[in-house]
Image: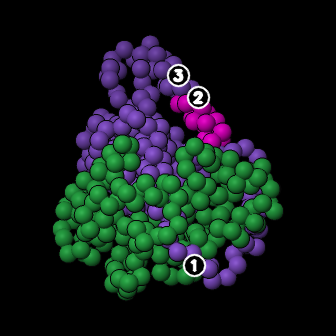
Chain colours: A purple, B green
Amino acid sequence: MTVSPDDDFAAAEYALGTLGASERAALAARRLREADLDEAIRDWETRLAPLAEAAPEIEPPRDRLPAIEARIRGASLNAPEISSVVALERSIRRWRATAIAASLVAALLAVGFAARETSRPSNPREYVAILQKDAASPAFEVTVNLDKQELTVRPVAAQAPPGKAYELWLIDAKLGARSLGVIGDGPRGANLSAYDPSVVAGATYAVTVEPPGGSPTGQPSGAPVFVGKLIPVTP
Amino acid sequence: LRRVATRDETAFASLYKQTSAKLYGVVARIHNRSDVAADVLQETYVRIWDKAGEFDPARGSALGWMATIARNRALDEARRVRPASLEDQPESFEPAAEDIDPLAARERSEGLARLIECLMGLDEEKRAVVLLAYYRGLSREALAKRFGRPVPTIKTWLHRSLAQLRDCLAS
């Protein structure tokens, strides 16, 4: 195990269930990207799991099996039969490929610019993140210009469920989850001047499903459905 | 569970019959509203169906694995509905007598016996904090209210108790 003592404690509290909404959401987002942290959480879940044996049984109020069977049959009609792990690995590979392709394109563009405009500032510090579901195609593209402290988010293929809205969050290990606003159908900007550039560059960006107008509590209402981290687009 | 991983619906139905009361016992103690608890139970079994292939017997029992999924669904839901959840009314749902005492469990798997041994090493109040967090899904804030201590104290207790449990289980 290679996580820091702080992260191991956070993993323990995640498994025990004592984290508040924002810390829990932050850790849920990070574990998708950080294999060591994910492993630490699993280790803690394994350590505590025997406790469940001691919980006395309670008969569910009515038989939920038919509803569950309907759900899993519906799911297998349109889902390919690959395990989620394989799907996740593929999705990460695809994400890496997309990210590499994006930086290549950006590098080429930068070269093109440099050839034409030699007076261009040398370190524009632009970043991009592709936010994805664990096993789906890219859903949102987040671009950040650190010099202008501006963020732009563009929906690529995502549409919020009926009567719900997507909300974008900056998630930092120390700050927790901070809202960057509700995402509509088109591109949307957000000002990042409240955050330190190192926080902006290192944060996880996540999208959650919220009531229209955004989370009523100012904290994510549930686990993120799309997550990603920034990578530099300029060499 | 192995047969469920091969998309065997008969095996899944039998797994549900054998385990749903157990998992509902886990979920319903975190959610006192039965409609919410039943929805969480439903989500849990859909997830078990989806992820059965990921179960690794080397990491513990099948029931423990399923209970972990159930607890995670229940906790996600508990944090989601926070404004009206048990955290605001910690007294309304739990007569103390109903608290689960694993130390009194007569049937103990090897894993549970070992964990109980380690829990015995914590003093009574700190053990109660860990058990309430596990069985009731209480956050640090809710535990602080319940035990009449500041949140940082609870955090320190948890920190020490969990470190002690980890070291004890590893020894």
**The N terminus of chain B - image quarter:** bottom right
Badges 2 and 3, same chain: yes
- Of pointers 3 and 1, the one earlier in the residue sequence: 1
Question: Which residue occupies the foreground of this view, B65 or A54?
Answer: A54
Magenta span contains residue A90: yes
Residue type at numbered disc 2: Ala
B163 to the left or right of A78: left
- Of pointers 2 and 3, the one earlier in the residue sequence: 2
Residue B21 horizontal/vertical position (percent)? 62, 74
Question: Which residue occupies the foreground of this view, A15 or B21?
Answer: B21
- What residue lies at 67% left-to-right and 62% top-to-bottom? B46
The numbered disc on residue A58 is: 1
Q: Circle 2 is placed at which residue position? A: A97
Magenta residues span: A85-99
| Callout 3 touching callout 1 (CB < 8 Å) | no
- The subunit letter for the residue under badge 2 reads A
At label 3, counting other C-alpha atoms closer than 10 Å, the crowd grade (few under 14, some 14-19, many 20 or more) is: some
Q: Secondary structure at mark 3?
A: helix
Q: Circle 3 is placed at which residue position? A: A104
Q: Nearer the viewer, mark 1 or mark 2?
A: 1
| Callout 2 touching callout 3 (CB < 8 Å) | no
Q: Secondary structure at mark 1?
A: loop
Classify A160 as above or below A170: below
Residue A38 horizontal/vertical position (percent)? 46, 43
Residue type at numbered disc 3: Leu
The numbered disc on residue B5 is: none
Classify B35 as above or below B65: below
CA–CA distance in space, label 3 to label 1:
57 Å
- What residue lies at 67% left-to-right and 82% top-to-bottom? A62
